[in-house]
Image: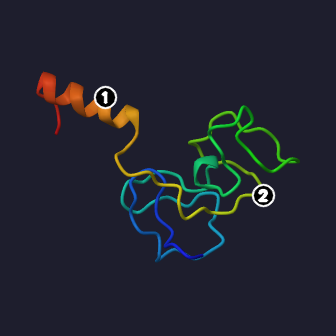
């Protein structure tokens, strides 16, 4: 891979993990599952059927670990700036004096 493998949710380096990733593998920084659709090279959120692998079974929750045999980790899965849920949670916590 030309880019270093990083967590799809927090962007932490996954260089210390061995490939292939196990189904139960988690990010050591944020404890989120890594064997998920959003971390796979066949995932494309802009499509009606986000999996580009034509024979793979459909997975409903793309943020949870799954048993897909076609999973291949994608180096560019993390998008800087966080996701909308995290941003909304941060805004609410700052508004109501919760955790920062």
How far separated are the C-alphas under marks 1 and 2?
33 Å
Coordinates of residue 46 in the picture (x, y in percent): 63, 37
Residue depicted at x 41% and y 69%:
13
Residue depicted at x 78% and y 38%:
58
**From the viewer's perspective, is residue 76 above or below residue 84?**
below
49 relative to 85 in the view: left or right: right
What residue did someone put label 1 on? 88
The numbered mark, 1 or 2, whose residue comes first in the sequence reads 2
Residue depicted at x 78% and y 58%:
70
Q: Secondary structure at mark 1?
A: helix
Q: How is the image coloured?
A: rainbow
Q: Which mark is residue 70?
A: 2
**From the viewer's perspective, is residue 95 above or below residue 42?**
above
66 relative to 25 in the view: left or right: right
Q: Residues within 10 Å of mark 2 (few under 14, many from 20)?
A: few
Coordinates of residue 69 in the picture (x, y in percent): 79, 57
Coordinates of residue 28 in the picture (x, y in percent): 40, 63
Residue depicted at x 59% and y 57%:
24
Q: Residues within 10 Å of mark 1 (few under 14, many from 20)?
A: few
Residue that extends furthest to the top in the rendered view of this protein: 96
Q: Which mark is residue 23?
A: none
Q: Secondary structure at mark 2?
A: loop
56 relative to 45 in the view: left or right: right
Residue that extends furthest to the right in the rendered view of this protein: 55
Q: Nearer the viewer, residue 14 or 46?
A: 46
- Figure quadrant of the C terminus: top left
Coordinates of residue 5 in the picture (x, y in percent): 51, 69
- Figure quadrant of the N terminus: bottom right
């Amino acid at each position: 891979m030309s880019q270093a493998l990083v967590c799809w949710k927090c962007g932490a380096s996954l260089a210390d993990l061995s490939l292939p990733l196990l189904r139960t593998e988690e990010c050591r920084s944020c404890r989120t599952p890594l064997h998920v659709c959003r971390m796979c090279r066949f995932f494309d959120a802009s499509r009606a059927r986000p999996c580009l692998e034509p024979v793979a079974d459909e997975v409903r929750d793309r943020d949870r670990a799954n048993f897909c045999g076609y999973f291949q980790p994608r180096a560019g899965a993390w998008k800087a700036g966080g996701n909308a849920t995290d941003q909304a949670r941060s805004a609410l916590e700052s508004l109501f004096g919760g955790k920062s």
